[in-house]
Image: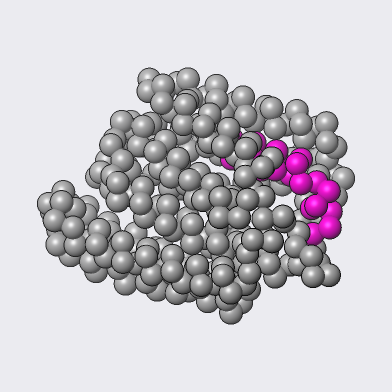
Amino acid sequence: MKNWAAFIRLARPHQYLKNGFIFLPLFFSYQFTHWQLLLRVTLSFLVFCLAASSVYVLNDLKDIQDDRLHPVKKNRPLASGAISVTEAGFFWILLALSSLMLTLIFPDFSVLMLTAGYIGMNIAYSFSLKHIPIVDVVTIASGFVLRVCVGGRAAGIPVSHWIVLMTFLLALFLALAKRRDDLLLAVDGKHLRRSLNGYTMEYVSLSMGVMAAVTIVSYILYTLSPEVIIKHGSDKLYLTTFWVIVGLLRYLQITVVKNFSGSPTRALIQDVFLQIVIAGWIANFVLLLYINR
C-alpha cells in the first residue's frame, strides 16, 4: 500500500490542474454544454494527465542526485528511495505509452502528434533545455500552449491566436516565478539548477513585472478587439480585466512577499484569494458569454 502511495506521489496528480488549459477552446466557443465535445476534451485531458506524469517521472529520474541535495525535493519518492530507479523507469514507459495509445481514439491524428511533441519536448527539456537560461522557461510556457492546441484539436475547434498568445504570456510569467523560488533555495551560495547561473533575483523579478504588464495589456487589447466583440456579441468583456489584474498582483505578492511560488498548482490549491479571483473571472465570463448571449 505504501508503495502504491509512492507511485501516486511520483506521478504528481496535483499538477493536473495545469491541464485545465485544455478546456479553454471549448469554453470560448460556447460549446461547453455540448456533451459529446466535452467528452472528447475530457479524454484529451486524461491523455495529458498521463503524458504530464510521464514527464515528471522522467524529470525525477534525471535529477535524482540533485533532488537529494534539495531541501524540499529530497522527500520525493525517487530521491528518498521509496521507489527504485528501475521501478520508476518502467512506470515512465507505462505512462508515456498509455497516453500515446489513448490518442488513437481521436479521429484527428494531430492529437497524437501534439501529445508526442509534448513528450518529446519535455524529454529534451529534462536532458538539456532546462539547463539553458530563458530557453528553459520558454519551453515550459510552450507546454501550456500545446495543451490549448490539443483541447482545440480534440473538439475540432479552431484555436484563437488570442488564446495562444495569452496562454504563453501567463505561463511564462508563472515559469519565471518558479525560477525566482529556485534562486531562493541556493545551498551554500550554489544554485541547485545549472540554468540559474543565468538568472539573478533582480533579473527574474524585473522580467516578471514586464510579463505581468504585457499580459494585462494583451488581455485588454483582446477584450476591446473588434473581431472579439463581434464573435462574442458583447462589448463588455473589458469588465473581466479586473480579475486578471488582481490575480496577477496577488501572484506577484505570493512570489515576492511570501516567497512561495515554487509550485503554481500548490499556490492555487492553498490560496483562497486566488481561488476567489479565478472563480470570479469564470463567473464573469459565464454571465457575459453564456447567460446574456
Q: Is residue 262 left or right of residue 281?
A: right
Secondary structure, magenta segment, majority class: helix
Question: On the rendered image, what quadrant is the N terminus found in?
Answer: top right
- Rendering quarter of residue 278: bottom left
- Rendering quarter of residue 97: top right
Which residue is painted at 25% across and 43% down in the image?
29
Residue with the most extreme bottom position: 257
278 relative to 94, above or below: below
Q: Is residue 91 left or right of residue 143?
A: right
Which residue is painted at 48% across and 45% down in the image?
142
Scheme by which the image is coloured = one colour
Residue 40 x %, y %: 39, 31
Q: Is residue 51 magenta?
A: yes
Which residue is painted at 30% across and 62% down in the image?
219
- Rendering quarter of residue 210: bottom left
28 relative to 122, above or below: below
The magenta region covers 50-70
Residue 272 x %, y %: 51, 70
Residue with the most extreme front position: 198
Residue 140 visible in the snapshot: no
7 relative to 242, above or below: above
Which residue is painted at 52% across and 60% down in the image?
174
Viewer-closest of 151 and 170? 170
Residue 186 visible in the snapshot: yes
